[in-house]
Amino acid sequence: MEISESLSQRDESHHATVAVYGEPGSGKKTLISILNKRPYKRDADGKVFVFDARMATECSARVSIAIVLYNAVHNPAALEETLELARKEAGFTCVVQTKFDLVTSDFSYEHLNRLQFAPSIAYTYDVDCVNASLTTAGGVDELLSLLMNHLEPPSVPRKPVTLGRLQDALFDWIAALFALPTRCTTSDLPSELSQITSYADVRKRMRTEFDMAWGNRLKQRLHASEDSWSVGIHRISQSLVAKIAAPSERASMEYVRQNTSIPVPRTYLPNISMLVMDFIDGDMLHECWDRLGLFRRFRIACTLRVYVKQMRALRRPAVGAVDTGRVGGILFGDDLHGPFESLARFRRFCELVAYVGWRPLAAVAQMRGEKPPPMPRPSLDWTPVFTHGDLNPSNVLIDRQGTVWIIDWDSAGFYPSCIESVAMWHVDANIQHDNDAISWHGYRWFIAGKTTEEEEQFWYNFCSGIHRFPGIPKP
């Protein structure tokens, strides 16, 4: 963090009054001295910030920022009460866990407990929390960055034309050029729909000889166990299938149909609890991939890249399903979570879950005398974009005319852009690695974008910890 001494910069700087709360011995005077020492210049854009930090008891009016300190060795029992008071008196409140240098960094049980305080407090109280040692200045830069970014969000510089951006633009152009045409030809269904108007009508057509024969063939195609009772979807007529699904899947399918050109089955009977939709006659990609020539595979990958780009153009300020805002999918375990009031709260939830997943790995490494893996502290882009969330070869259909369809929108919603690629990586690594060709795995980065090792490790930790956070059972 660059420090500025120029007096002329003080006139152009951003000023803020800071109220500091904390128990005796938590480091209030030291922090006040640090903040009041001199102007601070942000490296990203050169803007200068001047803080007027005081004891909370000395502040007679509402302040810009409140900082609540608590001791890393003796956790104040009054933290919740202090936070409530600070939030009433300030426009922005954060927590600093001080004297962290007094905790031995040996990844012992006590050390891991102290490390967990920050993400736990951040999520529990929906507040930013920083670990710091004010005597050694450890963590001070992170705190200053947090305060400055709240006072004045850094201006987003125009992205330089990098080799990566040029490569993405080139690949987008190539994908658009070679993408397969979309011919969404589906049958007119007045006669079939006239006989299926209720849940009872759908149930009557399930488990028939026609449905069971089709279901058995589907189990073979999916390599499902022969003794499995069902694959979860039923053929109820020549042109219709039905499945038990959450309302969010129907909402996602309709949203995609209205806002993109991606071929998605039409849905029917919105007033019943089952999802009734078009039957698409074709092959799942995992059935036919090995039979396809190299150029045909490439064109399918181009088509999927075009679809993903269309989805990512759809944005919302909050994460979750189109209709409910709840969060779910392959990476989120068996339950639904949320809805989250803000993107920051979702981020704090993910960081806590990732820490809980990382902690056993660190403990095992410590016991073996090995270096623990890095803590999950990624610099992710959390901006929510529309995401399918399970873009694996069994959810891609190639119909008899060669059109590429996307099915199974159960995991769809608004999520950070890396989730699409991370979910594909998770499926490839943990679920279908024996069933799908290596050449398919090699297209992941082209279809959904590259992921960094840091991102993959963060979501690996997240998946390891999510089972400790029970949510709402899926319908």
Image (cartoon, helix red, strand yellow):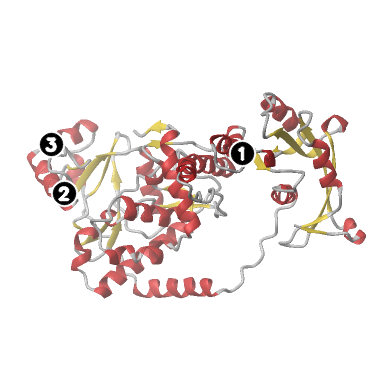
When the figure is inspected, residue 266 is found, relative to residue 201, above or below; the finding is below
Q: Residues within 10 Å of mark 3 (few under 14, many from 20)?
A: some
The quarter of the picture where the C terminus appears is: top left
Quarter occupied by residue 122: top right
- Residue 153: give x, y in percent of width and height: 70, 53
Mark 1, mark 3: which one is toward the viewer?
A: 1
Mark 1: amino acid: Ala
Residue shown at 25%/63% (left/top)? Answer: 437
Residue at the spot of label 3: 207
| Above or below: residue 295 compared with residue 361 | below
Relative to the observer, which residue lies in front, 31 or 203?
31
Q: Amino acid at mark 2?
A: Leu
Which residue position is annotated with label 1? 118
Q: Is residue 80 left or right of residue 416?
A: right
Considering the numbered disc 3 on the image, is that residue within a helix, a strand or a loop? Answer: loop
**Numbered mark located on residue 218 in the image:** 2
Q: Nearer the viewer, mark 2 or mark 3?
A: 2
Residue 19: horizontal and vertical position, in percent? 81, 36
Q: Quadrant of residue 157?
A: bottom right
Which of the marked residues, 2 or 1, is nearer the chain's N terminus? 1
Q: Amino acid at mark 3?
A: Arg
Left or right of residue 306, residue 16 in this image = right
- What kind of element bears circle 2? helix
Residue ID at (35%, 43%): 249
